[in-house]
Amino acid sequence: MKNIMIALRPALVSDIDTLWALRTVAVRLSCATHYAPEQITAWTASPVPAAYATMLAEGGGIVAMLDEIIVGYAMLDLHKHELDAVFVDPARAGLGIGKRLLAALELLARERGITRLHLSASLNAVPFYRAAGFIALREEAYAHPSGINLASVVMEKILPPA
């Protein structure tokens, strides 16, 4: 299974429901080791934020495709220079899909003149971002739109010029 052919392409606004469904599954399965069940329930019950459609329309999203199936995605807020999301189908974790998506998103950022990326990482994702060169700045309680607070780590990475 290591020799699977994953193709990357720009994410489209029409992908939004598929992306949100993938994100919901990933949060339920991948974040459950670091967050309480009631937090996961509230986190995954929230609707797609309006900002997602904006980021996609502005070209800030990349999807990973296996055949015709979206198996991961990454989102960048081009105005805030914020990495909003990197999610991979948990059934395909460990295949390097997240690393490829993150590298592609960093390239997109550099091509747009962005020299520094920041993010608010869920606790389970901190090792992934640290391995990719992000530096932890501080821990915080992220105020999720559902009204809950989620422990997270603010991280940043200085990008080399394109």
Image: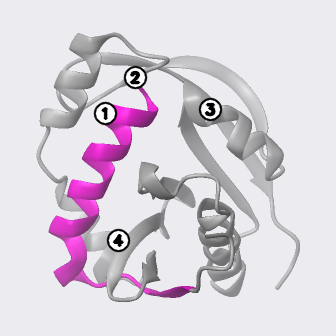
Q: Residues within 10 Å of mark 2 (few under 14, many from 20)?
A: some
Q: Please tell me which residue lies in front, 116 or 75.
A: 75
Disc 3 designates what residue? Answer: 154
Residue 91: horizontal and vertical position, in percent? 44, 53
Q: Identify the mark nearer the N-term, 2 or 3.
A: 2
Residue at the extreme front of the image, as rendered: 1
| Image disc number at residue 28 | 1
Q: What stretch is highlighted in magenta?
A: 6-31
For badge 4, the amino acid type reads Met
In percent of width and height, residue 76 lies at 49, 65
**Could you say which quadrant of the image residue 69 lies in?**
bottom left
In the image, what residue type sits under mark 1?
Answer: Arg
Magenta segment includes 20: yes
**Mark positioned earlier in the residue sequence (2 or 4):** 2
Q: Is residue 29 magenta?
A: yes
Q: Could you tell me how far apart the alpha carbons at marks 2 and 3 are, in whole angstroms?
A: 20 Å
Q: Do residues under tags 1 and 3 come within 8 Å of each other at their CB atoms? A: no
The secondary structure type at the circle numbered 3 is: strand
Could you tell me if the residues under marks 2 and 1 are in contact, i.e. CB atoms within 8 Å?
Answer: yes
128 left or right, relative to 71? right
